[in-house]
Structures are given as C-alpha cells and as structure tokens.
Image (cartoon, helix red, strand yellow):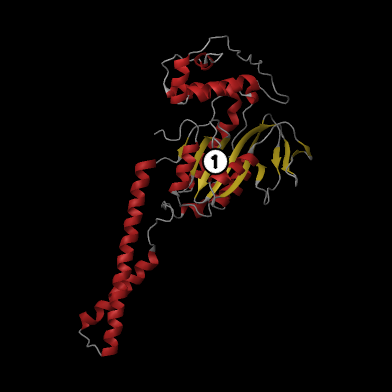
Amino acid sequence: MPDVDYYEVLGLRRDATAADVKTAYRRLAKTMHPDGGGTVGTFRLLREAYEVLGDPVARARYDAVGAAVVPVPVPVRPRPRRRFGDEPGFVPDLPELDAEDLSWWHFAGEDTRMRHGRRRGPGHTPVVVAVAGMVLVLLPLVTGVGFSTPVLIVWLLLTAGTALLVQRLARGYLRAAKAREAYAEEFGGRTVFGSPGTERDELAERLTADLLEGYLTRLPGARIFHGLAWPGSVFADVDHAVLCGKRLVLIESKLWLPGHYETAEDGRLLRNGRPFRGGGSRLTESLAAYRDLLPGVALRGVMIVYPSRSGELTTADPGDLPVAPMTPEEFLHEIGEWLAADPSTVDHETLRTMRDQVVGGGRAA
C-alpha cells in the first residue's frame, strides 16, 4: 500500500481527469523542481504521483488498493532575492533597426509565396519548355507543311515528349495544390506556436518573442515556437526556436549584467575576458536532443542577451560556434541571414514535430 496520497501531492480530487493531472503536475513542477527552489526528494515524489495517476492502468490499481494519507512535505520557497546588479524597474529596449540595414530583408521579401517542402509547383522552366514544344507540334498542322519520313519521325517524337511533359506538369501542380490544402487544414495560417513566459523573471523571453515576431515573420517559411520540451520531457527546456526550411535555431533568452560576452574555444562563457558564472545555459544539451529528434535539419544555438541594468552590453563575433551569445541586433543580422538561405519553404514533417514539442499549447487554435 502506498504510504502517501498521490491525489494530495498533486492537489487534486479523486475524480480529476487525465488533463487535470497533467496540468497540476506542470504547475507544481515549476516550484518543486530543484532548479526552481524545491528539493530532489519532493520533486521525486511529485514525479512518482504523476507517473501513477497519469497512467490509466496504474491509477486504477492505485485506486483499488487505496492510500494511507500522510502529510506531504511542501517545499517552502525562499523569498525572492534581488540578484546582484539588478536595477528595479529597468526594462531593456528592443532594437529599432532600419530594415534597409538587414542584408536579407529585401531578398526574403522578393518571393512571398510559401513552398511546401519538396511538394512544390514545377516552376517556370518546364512550363516554358512545354509551351514551346506544343507550338512546334502544332505549327506544321497549322501551316499545312508536308512531312517527309524523317521529319514525321521527329515530329512524332516531339509530340510524345511534349505530351509526357504536360502530363508531368499537371501532376506536379496537383501535388502542390494538395500539399497546400493539407497544410491549411492542419496548421491554418499560424506562424507562431506557444507563448513566452509571463512571470516577472521571464521578461527576457517576452522581449525575444516580440523580436522574433516583429522581424523574422518577414520570411514566408519561418515558423516561431515558444516553450519547447526536450523529447520525453514535460518542461519548457528551450525558450524559443525558429524553423525555416531545413534550418532550425534554438534560442535562450538571458537578462545579464552589462559587459562583453563571448564563448571561449573550450566552450566556456566569458564576461569581460573572465569565466562568467552569473547564469547557466543548456543549449548544448538542447542541440544534442534536437539533433537526434530531427536528423537532416541544420541546427544552431543562440543566447540572446539583454542588459539587466543601465550600461553597454556587447558580444563577440560568433564565427562558426554552434552556441554563442548575441545581442538582439547581432541576432537579427547573423541568424536572419542564415535562415533566409531558404526563406519560403515549410517542411510539413519537421513543422509537425516541432509543434508537438511545444509545452501545453502546440495544437491550440
């Protein structure tokens, strides 16, 4: 017989639905996780309660056996302390860039049509070839020119080739039309999935959400995600992501002290040339997790850094580093250009996988 009441652990009644169980777990996990002020023991208990009550078979067995109700230790959250260097009420400004300063802006806007992965229209060249072939086929019939045997053979071959090309063009257009219809039915006109954090300490996430939605939606194929889980996780392990074609950037939003940030050759984060211990990052782990989830997709990781108080904040040139700190301005220049290499393609399968990783909101209308 279990020695705790799992319903009490999650704060639920015994007639709670499966959705209630999941919602309660996600809400409590934020405070009971060791990274959120809880302890390893209380979080293990919460996880155990969720695994039992979240599984219909295990829950039925648990309900049949019953539970001895005992007090459940509730972690006492320490009063939030002001971090060193914080400036109460300070909100960093987002960049106000002139679109003319972004090398990719006009290039991305030249073609506003959305292409659906490999299931795209056949393009203009085959159409021109097909029209030219039809003209050559019909010209002798219209002019009444007689055929010698060699000319007749060439004409017949040309006619057969033109007919085959027209048939392939028709099939290509039909596939593209079906792909557009399937996309509209499944995703509608959505370009943003999920929402940034709403807590006071999640200001940087909201700033990045405004940045992404204000600029990168210029790319017809760009899809933006907020709050993504690693495969097998229920937490928002990744703050944001942007997918465009077969390129994906994972993003963490940071509110750090002014200074100069860079990544050393050994992967350490430096501030003003010294190891920076004022904030952690899980981007390396996130890249590994999504590399396994999405083989064949090009990945990059970025920390967008905002100042936590008045003062100048700069970052070094990221070069070829897979993970790098960037200011919002550098992000728009560097990552915007990288994503704009294929600005119009939407890969349905990759988009579906990313949407399903959004915590608690990927399928919402």
User: Which of the image's four quarters has the C terminus?
Assistant: top left
Q: Is 203 drawn above or below residue 38 in the view shown?
A: below
Compared across the picture, whether 183 is left or right of 163 comes to: right
Residue corresponding to mark 1: 241
Q: Is 265 drawn above or below residue 237 in the view shown?
A: below
Q: Nearer the viewer, residue 204 or 266?
A: 266
Q: Nearer the viewer, residue 73 or 37?
A: 73
Please, which residue is most extreme toward the bottom here?
148
Q: Residue at x 63, y 23 (%)?
A: 36
Determine if residue 38 is in view. Answer: no
Residue 205 in the image: state x and y as whole percent: 57, 32
Q: Nearer the viewer, residue 94 or 272?
A: 272
Q: Is 364 drawn above or below residue 264 in the view shown?
A: above
Compared across the picture, whether 260 is left or right of 96 comes to: right
Residue 135 in the image: state x and y as whole percent: 28, 75
Q: Residue at x 67, y 51 (%)?
A: 320
Determine if residue 284 is in view. Answer: yes
Q: Residue at x 52, y 25 (%)?
A: 51
